[in-house]
Image (cartoon, helix red, strand yellow):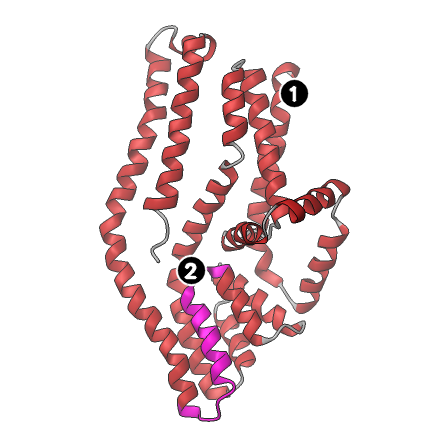
């Protein structure tokens, strides 16, 4: 038992940490005041260990800012408060864990090498899947938010107050409530309303929230109430037009997405069928050199197919 458990420990530790981080990220926004926002910032700096600092320094020198920004934006849109350094650590841990799993436990060094490389890209696919699912939920919440905050701004002429009142309306409705809490907390600690709205647009990945932010910056400098009202209302009207078009396209593409996942799932299903119905099948796939090679190729194809579905077929419609 010890022999079997030792190679699996890095993978088990990684899975526990990753799942725990994802769950924490989803529920952390339930009580985010300006004070807790500052505490989180202080804790983040205090908890950085030497390894993390070294990795961060290396990536800042060797990796382009645009690539780091893109990965960090992806994590934010999936609800994960990860820096690029956190992402690199997760990818490296996953790579080492799978290498040990396949090389030591399954005694397939070829598969271990393949998966140590493939595993570097797996966390991104998992995060992309979470992001796509989250976008689908946010899509149904952003429209009501824009409508409510614009109407409240028209009545109060105070965008920050309009945001706070609208946030309370969304209490208990995730993930929008958590995102609004972060936005309000940023404003309370001194971030300008325009920048806080830009950050909200970045975290939600919604171009119409970005337009609302831009229109607010313009409207806040104009003196005519009628111009302000019409300008902000345009962002919401454009969002609604886009939403109606997307609803039609989603119906058209939902069946191909479902069929794609079903086709991919048949591959492991056939493997399980062969394992339980054909004598020596599992031994051949796990011990024989040809079986090991076939296993590595098949699993690589599955991962490639899942990547294609997530990145192309099931990706959010823009």
- The answer to if 267 sits in the magenta stretch is no
Please report contact status of discs 2 and 1: CB closer than 8 Å, yes or no: no
Residue at the disc numbered 1: 6
Q: Is residue 132 above or below residue 231?
A: above
Residue 192 makes an appearance in the image? yes
Residue at position x 35%, y 69% from top?
239
Main SS, magenta region, reads: helix
Residue at position x 39%, y 33% from top?
304
Horizontal and vertical percent position of residue 314: 34, 46
Horizontal and vertical percent position of residue 22: 55, 46
Dot 2 or dot 1, earlier in sequence: 1
Density class for disc 2 (Cα within 10 Å; few <14, some 14-19, many ≥20) is some
Q: Look at the image and give the residue range highlighted in magenta.
A: 203-226
In the picture, measured across the screen, residue 216 lies left or right of residue 238, that is right
In the picture, measured across the screen, residue 271 lies left or right of residue 108, that is left
Residue at position x 25%, y 56% from top?
249
Q: Is residue 81 above or below residue 199?
A: above
Q: Front-most of 56 and 64?
A: 64
Residue situated furthest bottom in the rendering: 224
Count of picture labels: 2
SS at badge 2: helix
In the picture, measured across the screen, residue 205 lies left or right of residue 65, that is left
Horizontal and vertical percent position of residue 60: 66, 49
Residue at the disc numbered 2: 138
């Amino acid at each position: 038992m010890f022999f079997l458990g030792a190679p699996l420990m890095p993978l088990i530790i990684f899975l526990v940490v990753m799942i725990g981080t994802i769950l924490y990220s989803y529920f952390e926004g339930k009580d985010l005041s300006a004070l807790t926002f500052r505490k989180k910032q202080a804790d983040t700096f205090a908890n950085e260990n030497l390894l993390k600092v070294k990795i961060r320094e290396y990536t800042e020198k060797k990796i382009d800012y645009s690539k780091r920004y893109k990965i960090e934006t992806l994590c934010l849109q999936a609800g994960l408060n990860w820096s690029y350094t956190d992402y690199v650590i997760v990818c490296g841990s996953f790579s080492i864990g799978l290498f040990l799993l396949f090389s030591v436990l399954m005694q397939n060094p070829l598969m271990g090498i393949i998966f140590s490389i493939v595993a570097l890209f797996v966390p991104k696919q998992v995060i992309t899947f979470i992001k796509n699912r989250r976008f689908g939920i946010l899509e149904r919440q952003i429209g009501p938010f824009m409508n409510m905050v614009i109407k409240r701004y028209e009545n109060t002429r105070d965008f920050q107050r309009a945001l706070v009142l609208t946030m309370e309306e969304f209490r208990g409705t995730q993930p929008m409530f958590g995102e609004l809490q972060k936005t309000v907390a940023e404003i309370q600690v001194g971030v300008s309303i325009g920048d806080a709205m830009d950050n909200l647009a970045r975290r939600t990945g919604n171009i119409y929230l970005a337009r609302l932010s831009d229109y607010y910056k313009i409207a806040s400098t104009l003196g005519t109430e009628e111009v302000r009202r019409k300008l902000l209302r345009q962002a919401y009207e454009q969002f609604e037009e886009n939403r109606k078009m997307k609803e039609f396209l989603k119906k058209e593409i939902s069946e191909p997405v479902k069929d794609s996942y079903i086709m991919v799932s048949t591959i492991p299903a056939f493997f399980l069928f062969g394992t339980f119905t054909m004598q020596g099948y599992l031994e051949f796939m796990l011990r024989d050199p040809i079986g090991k090679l076939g296993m590595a190729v098949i699993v690589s194809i599955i991962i490639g197919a899942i990547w294609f579905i997530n990145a192309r077929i099931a990706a959010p419609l823009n």
